[in-house]
Amino acid sequence: MHNLAIVLHKKGHIVTGSDDEIYDPARSRLASYNLLPPETGWHPEKITSDIDLVILGMHARQDNPELLKSQKLGLKILSFPEFLYEQTRNKKRIVVTGSHGKTTITSMIMHVFMHAGLKFDYMAGSALKGFETTVGLSGESTVAVFEGDEYLTSAIDRRPKFLHYKPDIAILNGIAWDHMNIFRTFEEYKDQFRQLISAITPGGTLIYFNDDPDVGEIAGKARSDIRKIPYKVHGYFRNRLGVFAATHERVVPVKFFGEHNMQNLSAAKEACLQAGISEDAFYEAVRTFEGASGRLQKLKESERGIVFYDFAHAPSKVKATINAVAENYPDKKIVACLELHTYSSLNSEFIPQYRNTMEKAGEAFVYFSPNTAKMKHLPPLNPLEVKEAFGGDNIKVFTSTEDLFGNILKNRKDNSVFLFMSSGNFNGYDLEKLAGLLV
């Protein structure tokens, strides 16, 4: 939302906003454009009939006083995804979906488009080198690429966000149950992606990962007017010189690694080809792609070891990330640390989904804050039950960041790769400082 505010401000619109809490980097960035609200909280008296449009974020509650005032005045109200669609309704929209890999694929497509000199609109879930904001809207572009989230649109619209984008080209990269607080069963979760495919524009295209049986099942029932393009994990190999993406015709050095990223590469390639980018231009561009912020992001490397941070939180992503690091560093000890932070991951009914996800780590640490579970109105978790649910003798469970990081520092060894995974922030712990102590 704060990125969109900056973009609209730079386009010449008068933009105001409100929130109950505003943290950095949003706070500092809004302040730099003189867009930071003078006070936090909700002030319905500031909602007046001369407002052209209210853009509603997903975290505003249904009884939000500013929302109620906007409805009472009959103001035009659009959700974030509805607004992006309105801005791009006459453009070719590429929407990247799936339970994992969305941000990386979206960022990869954006990087290729930028490298090729193609003007485009975009929305990504993370910062990317070369882009000031995670949202971009241009009057000169004919194509848009959006990261399509299956989570709810807003308090007054319980549909998944990605349905509003009405994709001309949809990517479906994999399905693994998530958001248990909203989608109570795996079948209910899968149904959101069935609806996505139904929302593809007439004559549109579905690009899908053919080795995921659930994706294959859904793709197989797509409308007859939809063109279907299946893809697999891109060929690759690793040697002492680095990691290389490989086809029968070419070998290309890349700066990312792991099977899941090679799957992402195949998805991005198919989308770029559909947008008119040549194979030569695509592979030339991906040579310099360094990844999205927070996605297997290297915090520090020295002769003593390496420290990574990854946004991983869902079971499938945790396993894919650990496996990628273990595959890329076969001669190093892998120390993996996961924070349980989402509603699903803190739910005792869902935690068994994590079984054996951390088996490739030499040491595996699982951390959760009892206070976070309490704030989400969940019953308290038992550390012993969490350990049992994850499985494996390498699992250690902590409920205190001081104990957790103290244990990791005390037992650290050289030639290790440390991997910290979370959609939270480890109770505000400074991972950059920790990385300096570790390696």
Image (cartoon, rainbow, N blue to C red):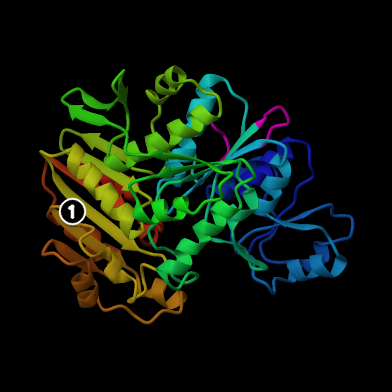
Q: Nearer the viewer, residue 114 or 272?
A: 272
Q: Residue at x 65, y 61 (%)?
A: 19
Q: Nearer the viewer, residue 247 or 152?
A: 247
Is 420 located above or below residue 246 in the figure? below
Which of the image's four quarters has the C terminus? Answer: top left
Main SS of the magenta segment?
loop
**Residue 89 location in percent, x, y?**
71, 42
Is 279 located above or below residue 323 in the figure? above
Residue for badge 1: 409
Give the left or right position of residue 181, taking residue 158 as reference: left
Give the left or right position of residue 86, taking residue 378 as reference: right
Location of residue 135 (image quadrant): top right
Taking the image as drawn, is residue 118 in sight?
A: yes
Q: Is-magenta flag for residue 138?
A: yes
Outermost residue on the front side: it is 224
Is 290 located above or below residue 422 in the figure? above
Location of residue 186 (image quadrant): bottom left
**Residue 73 location in percent, x, y?**
87, 66
**Residue 417 location in percent, x, y?**
19, 43
- The local crowd at label 1, few if under 14, some if 14 to 19, many if 20 or more residues have their Cα within 10 Å, is few
Location of residue 369 (image quadrant): bottom left
Q: Is-magenta flag for residue 36?
A: no
Give the left or right position of residue 5, taking residue 114 as reference: right
Outermost residue on the right side: it is 50
Q: Residue at x 10, y 38 (%)?
A: 331
Q: Which residues are magenta?
A: 130-142
Q: Nearer the viewer, residue 330 or 158?
A: 158
- Does dot 1 land on a helix, a strand or a loop? helix
**Residue 398 location in percent, x, y?**
24, 68
Q: Residue at x 31, y 78 (%)?
A: 381
